[in-house]
Amino acid sequence: MNKFCSAFNLYGYNSRSEVITGDRYWGANLNDTSDPVSGQSYGYQYDNIGNRQTANRGTSTENYTANNLNQYSQRTIPGKGVQGHSVMENKGKTGVKSEQSRE
């Protein structure tokens, strides 16, 4: 398909209304899932209080670790390893701040 064709997303949810799958397909018929868009298939798993534990994109899986305050303290990214970080606010956008040097 070329980039000017119609496409749509289908989402799956668990019993807590958390998104657990997201897939994109070429076409306009929501019942026709025979032509998936390459690289546009996602899956998510959560713990019992809603913290993300894994995020899948194709065959790649990211793992998340939450601390006792339900903040993400670590994320493992394929090809990059473990990423320790803390969340910071910057002009209304959430970003990642390295835990290395704070001097």
Image: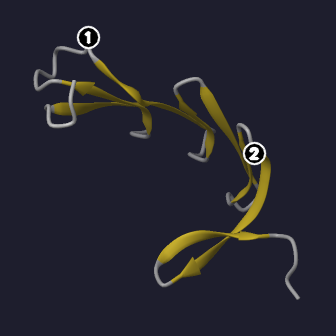
Numbered tag placed on residue 81 in the rendering: none
Q: What's the residue at 85%, 83% (across, down)?
A: 102
| Outermost residue toward the front in this view | 2
Q: Which residue corresponds to mark 2?
A: 80
- Looking at the image, which is closer to me, 61 or 70? 61
Which quarter of the figure is the C terminus placed in?
bottom right
Image marks 1 and 2: residues in contact by CB distance under 8 Å? no
Which quarter of the figure is the N terminus placed in?
top left
Q: What's the residue at 20%, 30% (across, down)?
A: 2
Side of 84 relative to 53 (left or right) = right
- Looking at the image, which is closer to me, 45 or 63? 63
Give the foreground label among 1 and 2. 2
Up/down of 55 relative to 30, above or below: below
| Helix, strand or loop for disc 2 | loop
* x and y percentages locating residue 43 in the rendered image: 49, 30
Q: What's the residue at 61%, 29% (across, down)?
A: 60
| Helix, strand or loop for disc 1 | loop
Pointer 2 local density, CA inside 10 Å: few below 14, some 14–19, many at least 20: few
Numbered tag placed on residue 34 in the rendering: 1
Side of 90 relative to 69 (left or right) = left
- Label 2 is placed on what type of residue? Lys
Q: What's the residue at 61%, 47% (across, down)?
A: 51
Q: Let me know if residue 44 appears in the view.
A: yes
| Outermost residue toward the bottom in this view | 103
Whichever of labels 1 and 2 marks the residue nearer the N terminus, that label is: 1
Question: Which corner quadrant of the image does residue 85 belong to?
Answer: bottom right
- Label 1 is placed on what type of residue? Ser
Question: Which corner quadrant of the image does residue 98 belong to?
Answer: bottom right
Q: How many marks?
A: 2
* x and y percentages locating residue 79 in the rendered image: 73, 39
